[in-house]
Amino acid sequence: MADKPTSGELFGVPYNFERPSFSRLLAAHWQPGEGMLVQKPFGIGYTLNLANWRSWIVVAVAGALFWQQQQGASESDVEGGTDEPVEVIVDEEDDD
């Protein structure tokens, strides 16, 4: 049986299934001089390059959206907007 390649590119998308070391994980996320997206140290696709200022904007926007979602969830609990079932009773009138 032939050995399958552990890293490469498939349809223009990079993949890497080599066991990552801690230093390789750190180096993959901090690559000065590269673009906003860099190849993942393990898995399929791309990840953010934290040495690029645009990546920090993406992280800040994602954090703000997450914070906003959490605030909306906690406000609905305070206002009594719990999602409990409601019983509805309907009286049917007979026309006899």
Image (spheres, grey):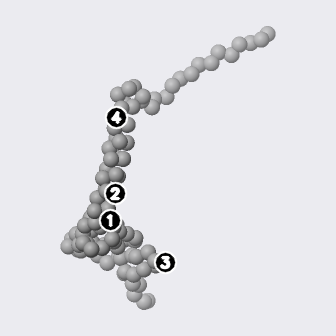
Q: Which residue is mark 2?
A: 58
At 39% from the left and 81% from the top, the residue drawn is 8
Residue in view at x 45 percent, y 29 percent: 84
**Quarter holding the C terminus?**
top right
- Contact between marks 2 and 1 (CB within 8 A): the answer is yes
- Is residue 42 visible to the viewer in this orientation of the structure? no
Look at discs 2 and 4 and give the one toward the viewer.
2
Where is residue 79? Give x, y as percent: 38, 26
* Pointer 2 with pointer 4, Cβ within 8 A: no
Give the left or right position of residue 66, taking residue 22 as reference: right
Q: Nearer the viewer, residue 63 or 70?
A: 63
Q: Reading the chain from its start, which is encountered first: label 2 or label 4?
A: 2
Give the alpha-carbon distance from disc 1 to disc 3, as whole Å.
20 Å
Precedes in sequence: disc 1 or disc 3: 3
Q: Is residue 10 left or right of residue 31?
A: right
Label 3–label 2 contact, CB within 8 A: no
- Is label 1 or label 3 in front? 1
Mark 3 = which residue?
11
Residue type at mark 3 is Phe
Q: Earlier in the sequence, mark 3 or mark 2?
A: 3
Q: Is residue 84 in view?
A: yes
